[in-house]
Image (cartoon, rainbow, N blue to C red):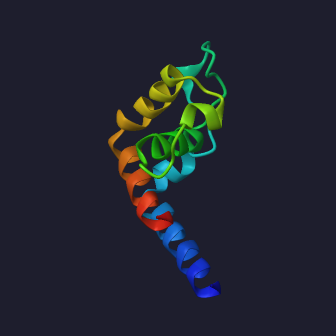
Amino acid sequence: MESAKQKIEDDYRALRQKYKPIAKKLGKKIPQLDGTKLEGFTYDQAIRIFMWDYSPLFENVAEKTGLDQKDIKALAKIVQDDKQLTQFARELGLITG
């Protein structure tokens, strides 16, 4: 179990190294959302919503997050519209399963 955890940590660290500009933005607020009801969401939160929204294993994203479908799609679109964010999210999904 400990070796699996270490592998995930190592893979995540390597992913952040590979995508340094994305890694620097993860905790930062998304400027496009300023002045909207989604103001204050960060890039890492948008990636999480993107991954949940497209995962067949995660159902009822709206119910579990308290966001409506329009908000979920808006956050996911921010990731989709940025090629590097999308790649980062997909590779993160491969690491976390």
Q: Please state which of residues 84 and 7 is positioned toward the viewer in this rendering.
A: 7
> In which quadrant of the rendered view does residue 91 lie?
bottom left
User: Quick check: 70 left or right of 86?
Assistant: right
Where is residue 15? Give x, y as percent: 46, 64
Residue 77: x and y in percent read 40, 30
In this rendering, would 17 be left or right of 62? left
Residue 29 seen from this side: no
- Residue 88 in percent (x, y) is at 42, 53
Confirm whether residue 9 shows in the render: yes
Question: Residue 63: x, y in percent?
Answer: 62, 32
Considering the image in quadrants, where does the N terminus appear?
bottom right
Please, which residue is most extreme toward the top here? Answer: 35
Which of the 4 image quadrants contains residue 18?
Answer: bottom left
Residue at the (45%, 34%) spot, across then down: 76
Q: Residue at x 36, y 36 (%)?
A: 80
Q: Nearer the viewer, residue 90 or 26?
A: 90
Residue for point 47% across, 70% down = 14
Picture residue at 41% right of the left edge, 43% below the top? 54
